[in-house]
Image (cartoon, helix red, strand yellow):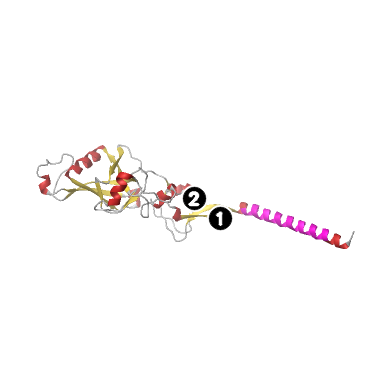
Amino acid sequence: MKKQTLFLICLISFLLAGSSFYAATQYIDVMAAERLFAPVVKVAPGKEISPFEPITQDDVVLVQEGIDEILPDSARDLESVLGKRSTQSMYEGEQLLTKKLTDSQLLPEKGQARYEFPLLAIQPMTELRKGDHVKIWVKYKAIHELQDYPEPLQFKKTNDTAEFLFESQLASVRDSNGIEIYTLKPSLLPSPDHMDAVFNGSRQKPLLNSEKRYRDYRVQPTALPAFIGFNLTDQQYVILNEAMTYGVVQVGHIMVSKEQAS
């Protein structure tokens, strides 16, 4: 056998052996990495998650973390935390523990029922988000408009301007198609766009529904709100319906402590 042929065979054998060795070491490294690291959900850089606010895609990141650094009960995928609420403040780089998250849908409590009203019948006075605690008032019509009205039966009229009715919690904000959009901004007079949405449906936006719902909570809604809902007792529902005949029902956000909200 010629030396050149022998040299070529040796070179090819060497390259094949080297490639096999490299592939084997890479495989071992991957296997080792899988054993030493795992995905975990953390609060995204520059973000802070406030208590009882829905977690959005922008709030969290999925990172590879050393197995020894992952806390028990940490969330391992984004879908398991989106839309849920934290029961306490969470800060940049903090792992999300599932035991500290809740996915309460603000269902009616015993003695309550969910009632939704068109925004044409209710006037928000502040920005409102699902879960907000609110005060509900009636702003009376002009005195000359009420001169032939009897005294209300379900609440007491104490002045000619406005009357506090009761406190409640905003349980839903929906567009005209019944899709939850979480938040609304006050509008003293309905705009043409708003009226068009009420009668002709919501605008279409290029966001996936799952992403859209959670982004809507903190930013400008991707659809126009048409209905808001509360969990009311029978008596509160009767009061609210009677109040609507005496004036405009107004709703405003009130701040509550963490202890009051839980």
Residue sitting farthest toward the right: 1
For the question of whether residue 87 can be seen, the reply is no
- Residue 80: image location, x then y, percent: 48, 47
**Nearer to the camera, 66 or 151:** 151
The residue at the point 25 percent across, 37 percent down is 234
- Type of amino acid under label 1: Gln
Quadrant assignment for the N terminus: bottom right
**Nearer to the camera, 77 or 11:** 11
**Does 81 sit left or right of 141 as displayed?**
right
The residue at the point 83 percent across, 58 percent down is 9
User: Which residue corresponds to mark 2?
Assistant: 78
- Residue 211: image location, x then y, percent: 44, 50
- Residue 2: image location, x then y, percent: 89, 61
The residue at the point 76 percent across, 59 percent down is 15
The residue at the point 28 percent across, 44 percent down is 118
User: Which residue corresponds to mark 1?
Assistant: 64
Q: Which residues are magenta?
A: 8-33
